[in-house]
């Protein structure tokens, strides 16, 4: 038998691509003599890794170039137990696969030069996985720097940006990231903890800051899955010309077909399995949406939907598989679910109805409707992807391991519950989750989600609070009894510890949750909230960003990052991120309310009038509230006894009674009226709580409360609330460790203790 290796005479040979086909076969003993020939005298055997096979194949083919196997690096071939297998290959010159500047690379890498050592490790691992990478190591002094980079970033299928404290400050890296984001190529990677530029925060980054090179690391596998959704690189005209000059018999398709044919002949039996091993991960086939001919808005909404949804899903760490059912060669029935859609333009608006169907019988198990002006088609496309990504990851990911115990009826209800989690209807959401646990009593995540929702209701207070607390604890205990490693159950437990004196106990539960699952989105969210409540806002930002970058986009997580940035006096960044969030969730009242708060309490008060006269942002504000906000902005912009007194009078008129005392105190802080602020706190009927919402200590540590903290009355108040005891046992708040600290917090605390 003779192995083929296409000879080349040019001075810049590109890598050889080897197409390897492995065919399971049950050879009769009479055919056993073929095996040593096919396997290189036994050097290739069942169960070998791709990396182990490459040197043998390279030697057998007499190819001097590194063999590139287009399979996920490090994954072992599932051939154990097969008595025989055959390998067939083809070897050919492929000018489209080079890693140098002369070929089309799958990936363009953007990084800061100081991070080169880390970049080299990532590039090596990507190449080992069978992907081609372009980065500036391939540039020579004779090449035009700008032109080469523009060519490579334009043709690459994916643009990986390595974010670090150094790269976030690089205008060049930011420019490349902007280009990639505008062309739907951006794949952000966090290589060190840092604050990602706000323009890119809503694009969830893959955290490789703790990655040590393992191809089986969950974060690395997440990256590989994301890259798989990006598609092939775009070939440049020069390379198309070169490919056109190759002999017809050396075409890619010819060689692949030949390889399969040889394998079939040698094996005598060819068995093709279309469904790869994905560890039981659920899959969704996105079908062609129903649109009318000539409806350009509907066509625009539908275009690229599968790829964009897959990117949102995989970027959040989900194993859920999404593929385009309209693509050539896509299997018609290989998925568990089918996403169908009907999109129409009617009277200047675009309407979409999207349904998730069971692939087995076509039954609709979930549906949603969206409507926006035609001019907002792109924003509506993104809103649909975010909504579905949130619901599908929540419901389908979590039920994948428990298909035997989660019936289709239970799944239908859980899909509704996952969608309702982002709504304001807490009691309806809790009812749905109760129904899930009734239909699937052994579904741990159903119980854990019920624990979190009941814990949330308990934190809001009200007549139902005691019952909600008991339900949260009981549901968490049930979840942990079924699955002791369920991190959300620990989060649910933490949410029942709402007193300031229970802060350390709540943090212990959250620490346990993040130990079990560092990417637990809600765990990171509440960990950040708890840190903010004791004044450790700088530290909280890291956890808020982890929450936002784990799982699909969810407005409370995004708002937590925005508010934390504002509390750190990074107002411009907060405003930029908020503007992006409002495009994704245009009807969200919480985001609109914070836009008004940001303008009045944090930003330049002289510019607040533009926000206060915006009918969209202020639609939910009462006339009395808008009047007060205008007076507060005026008192900040033009502080004087008259403007402060006018605002103070409006505060006293709007916040009447002891139940509104804390709200009044916060407003008095904004206008600098410290006497009324402290007087209002003294009128509070109950103590502040350790919750991410409602009356908690977080306003004490915001920029507008600088004078409130500097006041001699603050530390005695903090001691009375139990904050000083927490600080002494853990860490001191940001304002105590700042260069311009108003006093020595430790010394004052010791004096108060005497």
Image: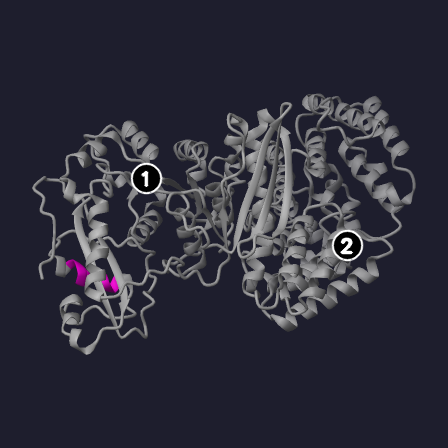
Q: Which residue is mark 1?
A: 233
The residue at which mark 2 appears reads as 457
Q: Residue at x 74, y 58 (%)?
A: 455
- Marks 2/1 in contact by CB < 8 Å: the verdict is no
Name the image colouring.
one colour
Mark 2: few, some, or many residues within 10 Å (few <14, many ≥20)? many
Per the rendered image, the range of residues in magenta is 51-58
Q: Quadrant of residue 157?
A: top left
**Image: 298 above or below 508:** above
| Nearer the observer, 518 or 159 | 159
Instruction: Work out which quarter of the rendered image holds the N terminus and state it.
Output: bottom left
Residue 279 on image: x %, y %: 45, 63
Q: State left or right for residue 391 relative to residue 492.
A: left
Residue 707, percent from left and from top: 74, 37
Task: Give the percent coordinates (x, y) of residue 152.
Answer: 30, 34
Q: In the image as oriented, which residue stretches furthest toward the left? A: 9
Report x, y in % for residue 20: 24, 57
């Amino acid at each position: 038998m003779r192995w083929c290796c296409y000879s080349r005479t040019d001075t810049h040979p590109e890598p050889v691509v080897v197409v390897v086909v492995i065919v399971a076969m049950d050879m009769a003993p009479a055919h056993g003599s073929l095996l040593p020939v096919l396997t290189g005298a036994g050097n290739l055997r069942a169960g070998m890794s791709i990396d182990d096979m490459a040197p043998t194949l390279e030697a057998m083919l007499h190819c001097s170039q590194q063999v590139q196997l287009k399979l996920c690096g490090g994954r072992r071939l599932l051939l154990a137990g097969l008595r025989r297998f055959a390998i067939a290959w083809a070897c050919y010159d492929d000018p489209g696969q080079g890693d140098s500047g002369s070929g089309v690379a799958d990936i363009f890498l953007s990084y800061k030069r100081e991070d080169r050592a880390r970049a080299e490790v990532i590039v090596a691992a990507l190449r080992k996985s069978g992907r081609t990478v372009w980065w500036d190591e391939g540039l020579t002094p004779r090449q035009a720097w700008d032109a080469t980079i523009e060519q490579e970033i334009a043709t690459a299928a994916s643009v990986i940006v390595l974010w670090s404290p150094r790269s976030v400050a690089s205008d060049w890296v930011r420019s490349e990231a902007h280009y990639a984001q505008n062309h739907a190529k951006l794949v952000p990677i966090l290589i060190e903890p840092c604050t990602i530029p706000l323009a890119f925060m809503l694009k969830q980054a893959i955290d490789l800051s703790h990655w040590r090179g393992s191809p089986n690391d969950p974060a690395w596998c997440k990256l590989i899955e994301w890259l798989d959704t990006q598609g092939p690189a775009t070939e440049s005209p020069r390379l198309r010309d070169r490919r056109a000059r190759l002999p017809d018999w050396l075409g890619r398709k010819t060689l692949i077909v030949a390889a399969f044919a040889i394998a079939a002949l040698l094996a005598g039996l060819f068995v093709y399995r279309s469904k790869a091993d994905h560890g039981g991960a659920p899959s969704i086939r996105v079908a062609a949406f129903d649109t009318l001919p000539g409806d350009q808005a509907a066509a625009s909404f539908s275009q690229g939907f599968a790829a964009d949804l897959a990117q949102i899903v995989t970027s959040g760490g989900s194993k859920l598989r999404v593929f385009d059912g309209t693509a050539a060669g896509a299997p018609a029935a290989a998925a568990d679910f089918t996403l169908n859609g009907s999109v129409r333009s009617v009277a200047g608006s675009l309407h979409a109805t999207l349904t998730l169907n069971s692939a087995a019988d076509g039954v609709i198990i979930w549906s949603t409707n969206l409507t926006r002006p035609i001019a907002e088609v792109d924003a509506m496309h993104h809103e649909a992807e975010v909504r579905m990504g949130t619901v599908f990851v929540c419901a389908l990911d979590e039920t994948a391991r428990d298909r035997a115990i989660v019936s289709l009826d239970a799944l239908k209800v859980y899909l509704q519950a996952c969608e309702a989690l982002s709504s304001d209807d807490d009691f309806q959401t809790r009812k749905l989750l109760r129904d899930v646990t009734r239909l699937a009593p052994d579904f741990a995540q159903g119980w854990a989600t019920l624990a979190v929702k009941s814990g949330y209701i308990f934190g809001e207070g009200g007549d139902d609070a005691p019952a909600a607390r008991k339900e949260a604890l009981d549901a968490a205990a049930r979840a942990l009894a079924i699955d002791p490693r369920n991190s959300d159950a620990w989060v649910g437990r933490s949410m029942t510890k709402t007193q300031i004196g229970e802060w350390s106990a709540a943090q212990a539960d959250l620490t346990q949750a993040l130990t079990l699952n560092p990417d637990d989105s809600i765990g990171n969210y509440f960990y950040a909230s708890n840190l903010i409540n004791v004044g450790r806002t700088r530290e909280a930002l890291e956890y808020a960003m982890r929450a936002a970058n784990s799982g699909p986009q969810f407005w409370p997580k995004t708002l937590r990052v925005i508010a934390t940035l504002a509390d750190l006096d990074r107002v411009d960044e907060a405003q930029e991120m908020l503007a992006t969030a409002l495009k994704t969730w245009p009807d969200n009242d919480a985001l609109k309310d914070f836009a008004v708060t940001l303008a009045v309490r944090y930003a330049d008060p002289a510019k607040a009038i533009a926000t206060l006269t915006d009918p969209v942002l202020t639609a939910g504000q009462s006339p009395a509230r808008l009047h007060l906000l205008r007076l507060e902005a005026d008192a900040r912009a033009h502080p004087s006894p008259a403007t402060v007194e006018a605002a103070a009078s409006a505060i006293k008129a709007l916040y009447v009674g002891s139940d509104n005392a804390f709200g009044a105190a916060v407003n008095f802080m904004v206008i600098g009226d410290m006497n009324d602020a402290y007087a209002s706190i003294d009128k509070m009927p109950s103590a502040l709580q350790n919750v991410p919402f409602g009356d908690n200590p977080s306003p004490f540590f915001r920029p507008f409360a600088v004078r409130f903290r500097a006041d001699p009355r603050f530390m005695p108040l903090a001691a009375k609330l139990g904050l000083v005891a927490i600080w002494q046992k853990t860490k001191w708040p940001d304002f105590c460790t700042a260069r311009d600290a108003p006093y020595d917090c430790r010394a004052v605390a010791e004096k108060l203790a005497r």
